[in-house]
Amino acid sequence: MLTISSAISASQAQTYHQKEFTAKEQNYWSQGNAVQGEWQGKLAEQFGLSGSVGPEEFARLSQGQHPFTAVQLVQHRAARQYKDEHGKMVTSMEHRAGWDATFSAPKSVSLTALVGGDNRVRVAHREAVIVALRELEYYTQARIGGNHPAETTGKFVAAKFEHDTARPVDGYAAPQLHTHAVVFNMTERGDGQPRALQERALFQSQQFATAVYQSELTYRLSRLGYELVPGRSGAPEIKGYTQEYLDASSPRSQQIREHMEKLGMESKAAAQIAAHATRDRKQMAGPQATLAAHQRLVAEFGNQPQQVIAAGQERAQKPNYAERKSPAQLAHEAVNFARDRLYEREAVVDERRLFRDALRRGMGEVKYPDVRRAIETRFTQGEFLAVHQYLHASARQITTDRMIAMEKEVVATMRAGQGQVEPMMSHFAASQMAERHPHLNRSQERAVEQVLTSSDRIQAIQGLAGVGKTTALSAIREGAESAGYAVEGLAPTSRATQQLRDPAHRSLAWRCQESGTLCATCHRMPETLPLKRMSRQHTRVPSTNLATTP
């Protein structure tokens, strides 16, 4: 998966480069060789950066300078101390050098590559990182300043450092294949003007880039003969490892989970906090001691890495192992799934979510380029359409021809119902109803009065979360019921449906005074007639048959 750090300062970046990114202790499984690093990115190509990452070029970029000429490209801000209005000494933030985007292989992949010694798996990880980082770069934006929208540039410069060792726990460093990609705070506009990055686009693309990495990785692994299964966190794992062995080989992950459970935390942000809080600052054991501990663990659990590799090699040699469907067909099926899932509840979707869900659906069977071609084909055919983007959007916002047709149908139905029904209340009665709810603000009162006095068949209330839509609807329901209407509740999700079924949220039905039973006309399903004028000879009673849809 991909994790992106908060912005790191120039001094932090240079310290990390010297003590962590290039430290030989990070690569026990590579015989302790120092990490050289590698450049990637369109801006890196423009600068002429290639091969290993040099400390001087790294330091200059971290300070916003050209890597060779040291010309200041992005304004550098040094940290300074000053007293705030309360007389407290405050240190301002230093120039933001960039962000650490870390691609981590699933534990079973690390064990297969490192403990089992299948270097092809390590190459698969490396290639998947290249693809995912390239697609992350595609959505790079430049910070323009003020209230001006960010400009999508599609270029950055990144320094990659591949490590095979996790942070130590009690001196023991477990095998963990991962790549740090330091994305520097620098891009270039279309007119050639250098600018700082708009970091929002990086974080908006995080789940998308994770899906690209995992998809590319699992596709390559499956071609090597490995079977993939969903892991504990949903990430793909190579089949053949017991959960006990995976846990025993992940003391760092277990340490973080225990810390989170202790504090009652669950979110991803909390996991990052827990990771920093539980860092082991003790000296790591030497390479020989560390490798010996790995081998003891392997023997204890029956040498699972070698068994998994042997099974994969045997499976890859079978003649019927290749996919039965074409890559294009598999990609279109994955896109169909993503389209149906996302547009079930939304009319407009960020294209990265469409890519993400399609890649997750076709995990191990489809590659990212095939999915992108499938989506672009649908643009050409008119099924997908780009809509007007919001101010700071870093990706296309997509709708479908079907969604537009549905929207037009809704609008036509709404217009056909304008001025076609008798208002539920007079303006005076509606105003009195709103006044009986002193907790309503003026905006809510207007909404209540407008719905109760309208002669339109369809009314809609739209507002941001937390502005009081539900509160206003409660007053509208009370007014409608007092005017002789039965109110039925419909919900778009199973969770909302459950809330409606809760006794505290149940509506009121009407019971015939003449028969003493629930009248079929009074309890008409809302699909037939949402609001039905009832006889004044009916009495309200709590309904136990509230009509809902999942």
Image (tube, rainbow, N blue to C red):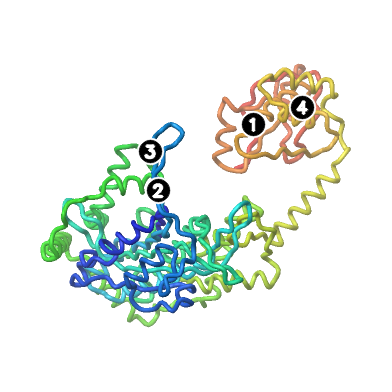
Q: CA distance from mark 2 to mark 1?
A: 45 Å
Q: Residue at x 62, y 53 (%)?
A: 344
- Res 405 visible: yes
Q: Amino acid at mark 3?
A: Met
Mark 3 or mark 2, which is nearer the start of the sequence?
2
The picture places residue 25, in percent across and down from the top left corner, at 20, 64
Residue 154 got which mark? none
Q: Amino acid at mark 2?
A: Arg
Which residue in the structure is indicated by mark 4? 485
Quarter of the image with the N terminus in it: bottom left
Judging depth in this view, the residue of 112 and 57 nearest the camera is 57
- Res 1 visible: no
Mark 1 or mark 4, which is nearer the start of the sequence?
1
Which residue in the structure is indicated by mark 3? 89
Q: Secondary structure at mark 2?
A: loop
The picture places residue 432, in percent across and down from the top left corner, at 78, 18
Q: Secondary structure at mark 3?
A: strand
Which residue in the structure is indicated by mark 2? 80
The picture places residue 433, in percent across and down from the top left corner, at 76, 20
- Vertically, is 385 above or below 518? below
Q: Kindly indicate whether the residue at mark 3 contacts the one at mark 1 (C-beta within 8 angstroms).
A: no
Q: Residue at x 14, y 62 (%)?
A: 290
